[in-house]
Image: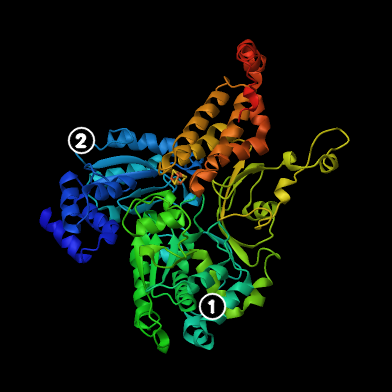
Amino acid sequence: MKEQINQIVSKYDGDRSRLMDILHDIHYKKGYVDEQDVKELADTLGVSVAEVNETVSFYHFYSNKPRARYNIYLNNSITAIMNGRQLVKEALEQLCGIPFGQVSEDGMFGLFDTSCIGMNGQEPAAIINGIVFTNLTPYRVGKLIEELKAGKELEEAIYESCGDGNNADPDIHSMVYNHIRKRSILLDRNYERFEVLKNKLSNYSPQDIIQIIEDSNLRGRGGAGFPTGMKWRFGRLVEGEHRIIICNADEGEPGTFKDRVMLTEFADLVFEGMVIAAYATGADIGLVYLRYEYKYLLKYLNRVLDEMRSENLLGANIRGVKDFNFDIRIQLGAGAYVCGEESALIESLEGKRGEPRDKPPFPVEKGYQDYPTIVNNVETLASAVKIIKNGAEWYCGYGTKDSAGTKLISISGDCRFPGIYEVEWGTSIREVLDMCGADDVQAVQVGGPSGMLVGQRDFDNLTNSELMKWYKPSGMMVAEKFFDRKLSYSDLPTGGSMIIFNNSRDLLHDVVMNFMDFFIEESCGSCSTCRNLPLIMKKKLEKIISGHGVRQDIDDLLSWGKILKVSRCGLGQTAANPILTSILNFRHLYEKHVQAMADYDNLFDINKSVEAANKFVGRKADFHHAN
Ligand code: SF4
């Protein structure tokens, strides 16, 4: 292997920052990276063994132990479970003769769980050796395993035709479906490939472009909502030998799959947006961070980049603009939700553990390799092209005053038409539910597990006078106020995920517990809050669900959730949201579970029991309000 490792490292010019690619290549050849490989890699790259080990051990899709010829990663997100994952899991265990987490003795099959793979509308789904298999059933996995055992190649074992649109392109050749259900100004076909780069860009100075984007009020579509024009302006102002544009294509928020569809159908628009951003900010290096789960798109995406190079839309003096030099490279991730956070993503791009950096400095000052770096989401970059084509005023004609334009929403769960909907900001939850054919809705998870679990009743947020409006003479609350809330930065912001749950779902046991498991699995472990509290909170929730909880447990969950907010990055800061927002909007479910223990609620009063001791030492203590 030593010689092969040397060859792989030289392919990347011995560049330490390409460690992710090097590890991918070793996995492709050998299936895993053992101790000896790590030592040889460390020697060849001139780094410590610990540094290589840190990267190998951090990512879900790297392994330091032998894996199987066919490694089956079955998605364990909530929609997979709602669509029969357990039966598929049991069938796989029986067919392969091993439980999940193991490799079969003959080394043929390995079974593993994995977090959301971006296929929420077509679950249960799995990734096998980088290929995505969707809509699995016990029958379908039975047929697949049988064919693999009979010696059929995995590529040939795709047991039905390809999905829609470019999924049938020979360079993608995937059974995945786009399911675009509603198109508006971003997804419409009123666009000629690369028309802004070819016909419009030279009409504008870089400052003009930034001004148009600022005037359009475009805000980051990944979820944070930072004004894009302002980010570009800051990026242009910071001095640096190089400037970097990064396209964040690491959409890992469970329930989100809109960027996958954008990259499948509108990759040219996304890359065109990167070139426009480079022109505006003076960047010369472009990087796309593509999540490992979308590896099946890599060949196709590289083809689009080659087509751009052949038309001088990438490279030197782009379209005749002197000294406008810019090119794009795609970096494949290796499975880590936290890499969606921009500084973690940059660490990963440098070949390190995807651990978020302390801020400041922000990436725009000191990002990739310490150069000024602008990180934009896939949808943001594509939207910028349409804005430059049609103007800021045109764009502001859609959406609301504080939220201009449209938003792509990935809809899944209990509805008849899951898929991608492009809606104007300002659209209400109720309108979205009508569009996708959702009946008997109990709750909607807006913005993925880090977002909000919302229900029809949202009375906790109402003032008394508002509350009275929602009472019927019978005294019954019949309001459906929450579903009238609108998708917008001022009301209900979202990165683009909506998962719908009907009244047959057990929200606490199935949904909230699943989301907590997700955060426990995905924490990078750097902050003690994020490393420990989600697990402790989940245990407390288990106690409540099992009927052993008391009302104080609900209060504890609320106060521990606040502690999590001090964590370093968004993952920890939002890890309590599944519990906090379900207490906020579905408190009655918690109350029902603690009812049985109501008698125990006030039996023990700590203040009373230490009263004598406090008196003796002359101390005043109030344990209930200590925090
Ligand atoms: Fe890592 Fe969690 Fe801390 Fe973020 S909050 S840096 S994911 S431990």
* 286 in relation to 196, above or below: above
Q: Nearer the viewer, residue 120 or 207?
A: 207
- Residue at screen point 28% across, 41% down: 110
Mark 1 — residue? 191
SS category of the residue bearing label 2: loop
* 302 in relation to 576, above or below: below
| Residue 254 visible (yes or no) | no
Q: What is the x, y in percent for residue 195? A: 50, 82
Q: How many marks?
A: 2
Crowding around mark 2 (Cα neighbors within 10 Å: few <14, some 14 to 19, many 20+) is few
* Residue 166: quarter of image: bottom left
Q: Nearer the viewer, residue 112 or 340?
A: 340
Q: Nearer the viewer, residue 537 or 546?
A: 537
Rendering quadrant holding ligand 1: top left
- Residue at screen point 49% across, 74% down: 236
Q: What is the x, y in percent for residue 213? A: 58, 74
Q: CA distance from mark 2 to mark 1?
A: 54 Å
* 61 in relation to 92, above or below: below
The kind of residue tagged 2 is Glu
Q: Which mark is residue 105?
A: 2
Coloring scheme used: rainbow
Relative placement, left or right, of 232 versus 23 is: right
Q: Nearer the viewer, residue 38 or 379?
A: 38
Q: What is the x, y in percent for residue 235? A: 48, 70
Image quadrant occupied by the C terminus: top right
